[in-house]
Amino acid sequence: MDLMEKNLELVEIQKLEGHTDRVWSVAWNPVSSHADGVSPILASCSGDNTVRIWEQSSLSRSWTCKTVLEETHTRTVRSCAWSPSGELLATASFDGTTGIWKNYGSDFECIATLEGHENEVKSVSWNASGSYLATCSRDKSVWIWEVLEGNEYECAAVLSEHTQDVKMVQWHPTMDVLFSCSYDDTIKVWWSQDCDGEFECVQTLGESNNGHSSTVWAISFNATGDKMVTCSDDRTLKIWGTDIARMQSGEEYVPWSHLCTLSGYHDRTIYSAHWSRDDIIASGAGDDAIRLFVDSHDSVDGLSYNLLLKKNKAHDNDVNCVQWSRGEGDRLLASASDDGMVKIWQVATKP
Amino acid sequence: MTLGLINANPVVQAKKERLVRTQEDQYRDDGVDPLDIYEYVRDIRDPEHPYTLEQLSVLSEESVTVDDKLDRILIKFTPTVQHCSMATIIGLCLRAKLNERLPLHYKVDILVSPGSHADEDSVNKQLNDKERVAAAMENPNLRQLVDECIFSDEI
């Protein structure tokens, strides 16, 4: 199916209002989608110090705010992430803590608070099995936490190799390899050779590896985990790849290498990039637009990408986060913005 | 806060005459006049001295440029000394003041004038990282200092 041949557009399904300050991030609950027969659930987090949980009614098909997680974080909640089981939500805050929330039917309760970072926590990520949590901060460190029984979390590693504010952490989709990106313009890869919890930095992707020339804001992997996209203040998206089969079968770390740079498409900072299950890369930028990119399948010059579509004025202000829903084939995209809104979009064929 | 002033002997210029602007002077109706922007920021008080940024020549009318097509505003300011550690505070004051006054969709970039600061690139990067700016403004002490500087004409 060649997406470029279809006449596609990004249709706004609904605008979710409620936050009273900018919305920084959104996260789809992994186990709820129409395909599972369960209503899709979306979490959003904001400069108003709260997290909102939104649910789509199966009857009316409209989205409403099911609950507000408040009175816990005392400052901006910068990002949030659902555990793989969908039962827990981790929230990263400028107050220096990471909250762990459990869903008890109609309400959420904060069952644990992870402390340790010296200042603002920027991002939180669960590994594929839910046995590890990673957080990162302006204090330049990346922390790995082990998830134990009885709502207990134990710090397994404090990794201090970035030289500046760490913006995001993201576990690989299938392997226990951790990626972080930073204000120091690099992406670092962390791996534990003996799987004993001793993580170390096994690779740094910087300017000398065809890396970014300014702050790297986000990382996203494709479904198979052999490619990732990164986005930056340098206004480019970069695609990286590795021989994932070799890495999965062997004992050795297999390095990532630069495959492609998408430049000239953005003229403001790109805050977010997300790779869908059916290979569409979405970007959210400081020019209020959302862009979608697809592989051109032009095998002459190696990997290259085409702009599938650009949605101008997707929001009234910067787009901070774009996230594809987890369901197969529904092509739903959620976006978060400085305008205080969350929007739900659908990729559809033009009438 | 440092005990000694970064720049103990600033050069102070006289307060500039405010020009009375006529209807003909008005810029395009749907655009933003750089001089209007300048009006918002010229009286911001310096964090260290009881003078405005204009009086200390940190800002002048030439500091503000507007790209009407893209709705972008660029402000270049000149710290009084090369190693001014107040540069980031001044940048925060500029942003805070403009946040109040400007329509939501305007993009504001704040830079130090080329060659005016020893850590030019590093200061510029910090001033334009909105996440860093947001976190700084949540710091009550910093917020108070910024508020004192931007609301000084109303005290």
Image (spheres, coloured by chain):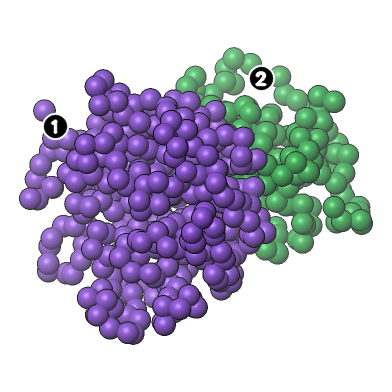
Chain colours: A purple, B green
In depth, the one of B54 and A13 nearer the eye is A13
Query: Which of A299/A181 is in front?
Result: A181
> Residue B147's x, y, as percent?
76, 35
Quarter of the image for residue A344 reads top left
The residue shown at (45%, 46%) is A89
Quadrant in the picture for residue B62: top right
Quick check: do tags 1 and 2 share a chain?
A: no
Above or below residue A314? Residue A83 is below
Q: What type is the residue that disc 1 sits on?
A: Lys
- Label 2 element class: loop
Indicate the position of residue B124 as horizontal and vertical percent values.
Answer: 61, 55
Identify which residue, A45 or A343, lies in the foreground. Answer: A45
Local crowd at mark 2 within 10 Å, few (<14), some, or many (≥20)? few
Indicate which disc residue A18 carries: none
Residue B38 placement (x, y as % from top left): 66, 33
> Which chain letter matches label 2?
B
**Quarter where residue B146 is shown:** top right
As drawn, is B74 to the left or to the right of A204?
Answer: right
**Residue at position x 35%, y 43% in the image:** A28
Which x, y percent locates residue B135? 63, 46
Give the residue number, with chain letter if any, for mark 2: B21
